[in-house]
Image: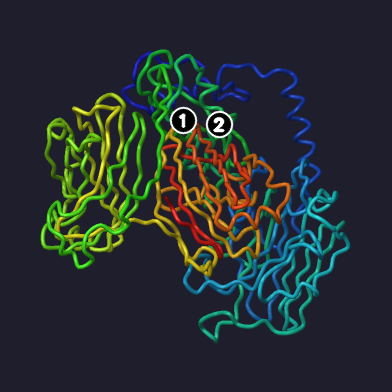
């Protein structure tokens, strides 16, 4: 790959110019010639895929051609879904697709499941599931589940005894799926000609729709560690059929672009983990790896500073050269040394600051001093309550030395004072102060206090108002700070603060996904530490803490549990530490265990989670999840949830 030495006046011109260099068959994306072994490997992969490809769609089916799941087999559970197919009472649905099984799959459940639900979208308030039927069959496992699925009605001519039995490869190939409601009950058949699984229920289905007159059900497929290439369907799905004709690319979304790259690193190595979701005509999309993308750094990779990354793609859905190449733009920085900031979530004491009727006056109550080390950020979550009389009747953050000599005092309403405050830059406040003031009574706040280590400090507060709007207030570059003697504390004025130190009911009665901690952002090349005590009902291994990694809009990268289990697009690629040698002892020791959990944003599209659980039996238990991918390093957050457990943060 040649690097442009001057910034182009138009990125499109740069993109098209580069396309002229790479538009021929076999064009090199980084000017690296493909060795003979690569061609040989490609042939072997193509041959393996050919085993899973069937012939034409059977007579009577309409073409419905699209792919569900990453073609590198990295899709985790509940990460990608097929279209919805609606089956009214008294009708039959037949679908056909190629099920692509990972040749290296070692678990029987790495295939697909069909979910049967009422006539609602996932996530809708009235969405309800009958249950799931997976293609593998394991009577002692979980190959079927749900409140309205009777496992005794399922049969198969291929039975697995454990999750690690051999034979999952036999499930691949062209699968014909039939869901039959013509006989008053529910009959499901899954077959590829080698393995046939059936579920035959003679009794009518309970109607789970809010409208009693609507007896339609929906079905959709969910792959795990596999991918599905649809061929056809007898029922038109929501969103319509997808033609098998080739499709032109329209746009793409990038993930895994590093925020920082060490000087001397080649563009190829720097972008090796970048992936893109390419959107084609007719609403079809697929995942594309760095090998199929074209990269250009502007102005170059040799000099330090911010760079513009132009990423291009020039293929159709079928892999032919497209009519008009598409591009996407990101920025990154070439640096001498990667940033190494750490974060620590802390809970100030007292846990309630100020009178709960908001009668406490200015400077009448303070939390304790909390130290912030050089290149560290302390993160505090709390709820702000206010009289609403004035803008300043909300939280206040004081930056000071250990002896309380002040650097700066900053308020939530774009105002402050002190020697260090004079040099800072504020975010400018809010557009509508009246709306903001009303939304602050009960607002959920996450405050970030950063010691930059160079004599300056930053304060940022994200205030999730009661009106559902996120308000931000920042103070950047507060100076006169001694980086080895920097502390902060909170004070109040006509308000009171409740610091978040508990999650879940103290009797461990909170059910799955019923409550979450506030979102905490972890910047690129940052590691965030959270210390807490874990309490559990002790019924199951999963009745302990759960960590959710997601974007700001709650789109998930991965969900991981305390007991060596997780799911999500990013989870599929990670390496768990393998769990515990004695699960019974571990579960008993987790009721009251002291946990130190680290969440690392590696800045390269991956994240790591490491938990040290100091059990009540005195034993330290370790649980790691290394290499969670599909991460956007500039949009990376985490939160906790519980499942018959209870967490107390320190």
Q: Position of residue 563 (x, y in %)?
A: 64, 52
Circle 1 Cα neighbour tier, 10 Å, few/some/many (<14 / 14–19 / ≥20): many
Residue for badge 1 = 258
Q: Position of residue 420 (x, y in %)?
A: 16, 32
- Nearer the observer, 266 or 320: 266
> Going by the image, does 153 lie left or right of 278?
right
- Give the total of numbered labels: 2
Q: Is residue 221 above or below residue 91?
A: above
> Going by the image, does 159 lie left or right of 272?
right
Circle 2 Cα neighbour tier, 10 Å, few/some/many (<14 / 14–19 / ≥20): some
Quadrant of residue 590 within the rendered picture: bottom right
- Nearer the observer, 510 or 3: 510
Q: Position of residue 399 (x, y in %)?
A: 22, 38
User: Is label 1 in a helix, a strand or a loop?
Assistant: loop
- Nearer the observer, 376 or 18: 376
> Going by the image, does 114 lie left or right of 376?
right
């Amino acid at each position: 790959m040649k690097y442009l030495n001057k910034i182009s006046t138009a990125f499109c011109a740069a993109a098209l110019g580069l396309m002229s260099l790479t538009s021929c068959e076999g064009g090199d994306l980084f000017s690296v010639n493909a060795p003979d072994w690569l061609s040989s490997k490609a042939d072997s992969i193509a041959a393996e895929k050919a085993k899973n490809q069937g012939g034409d769609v059977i007579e009577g089916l309409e073409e419905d051609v699209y792919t569900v799941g990453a073609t590198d087999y990295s899709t985790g559970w509940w990460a990608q879904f097929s279209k919805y197919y609606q089956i009214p009472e008294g009708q039959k649905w037949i679908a056909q697709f190629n099920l692509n099984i990972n040749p290296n799959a070692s678990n029987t459940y790495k295939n697909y499941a069909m979910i049967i639900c009422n006539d609602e979208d996932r996530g809708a308030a009235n969405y309800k599931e009958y249950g799931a039927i997976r293609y593998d069959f394991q009577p002692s496992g979980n190959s079927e589940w749900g409140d309205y699925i009777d496992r005794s009605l399922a049969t198969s001519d291929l039975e697995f005894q454990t999750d690690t039995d051999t034979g999952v490869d036999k499930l691949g190939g062209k699968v014909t799926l039939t869901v039959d409601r013509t006989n008053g009950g529910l009959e499901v058949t899954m077959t590829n000609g080698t393995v046939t699984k059936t579920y035959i229920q003679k009794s009518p289905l309970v109607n789970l729709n809010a409208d009693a007159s609507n007896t339609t059900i929906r079905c959709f497929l969910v792959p795990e560690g596999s991918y599905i290439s649809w061929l056809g369907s007898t029922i038109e799905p929501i969103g319509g059929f997808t033609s098998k004709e080739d499709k032109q690319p329209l746009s793409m979304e990038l993930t895994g672009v590093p925020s920082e790259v060490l000087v001397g690193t080649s563009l190829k190595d720097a972008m090796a983990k970048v992936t893109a979701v390419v959107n084609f005509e007719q609403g079809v999309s697929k995942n594309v790896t760095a090998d199929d993308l074209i990269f250009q750094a502007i102005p170059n990779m040799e000099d330090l500073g911010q760079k513009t990354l132009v990423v291009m793609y020039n293929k159709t859905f079928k892999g032919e050269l497209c009519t008009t190449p598409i591009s996407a733009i990101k920025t990154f920085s070439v640096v001498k040394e990667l940033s190494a900031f750490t974060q620590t979530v802390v809970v100030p004491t007292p846990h309630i600051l100020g009178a709960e009727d908001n009668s406490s006056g200015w400077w009448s109550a303070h939390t304790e001093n909390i130290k912030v080390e050089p290149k560290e950020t302390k993160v505090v979550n709390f709820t702000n309550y206010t009289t609403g009389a004035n803008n300043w009747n909300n939280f206040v953050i004081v930056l000071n030395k250990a002896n309380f000599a002040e650097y700066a005092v900053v308020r939530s309403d774009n105002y402050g004072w002190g020697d260090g405050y004079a040099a800072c830059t504020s975010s400018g406040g809010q557009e509508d102060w009246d709306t903001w003031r009303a939304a602050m009574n009960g607002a959920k706040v996450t405050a970030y206090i950063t010691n930059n280590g160079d004599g300056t400090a930053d304060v940022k507060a994200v205030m999730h108002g009661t009106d559902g709007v996120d308000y931000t207030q920042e103070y950047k570059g507060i100076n006169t700070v001694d980086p080895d003697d920097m502390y902060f504390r909170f004070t109040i004025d006509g308000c009171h603060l409740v610091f978040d130190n508990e999650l879940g009911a103290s009797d461990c009665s909170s059910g799955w996904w019923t409550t979450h901690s506030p979102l905490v952002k972890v910047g690129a090349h940052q590691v965030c530490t959270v210390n807490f005590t874990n309490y559990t009902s002790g019924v199951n291994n999963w009745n302990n803490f759960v960590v959710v990694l997601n974007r700001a809009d709650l789109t998930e990268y991965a969900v991981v549990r305390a007991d060596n289990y997780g799911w999500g697009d990013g989870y599929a690629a990670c390496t768990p530490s393998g769990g515990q040698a004695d699960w019974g002892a571990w579960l008993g020791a987790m009721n009251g265990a002291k946990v130190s959990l680290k969440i690392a944003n590696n800045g390269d599209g991956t994240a790591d989670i490491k938990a040290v659980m100091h059990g009540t039996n005195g034993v330290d238990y370790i649980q790691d999840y290394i290499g969670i991918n599909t991460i956007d390093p500039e949009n990376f957050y985490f939160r906790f949830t519980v499942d018959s457990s209870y967490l107390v943060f320190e």
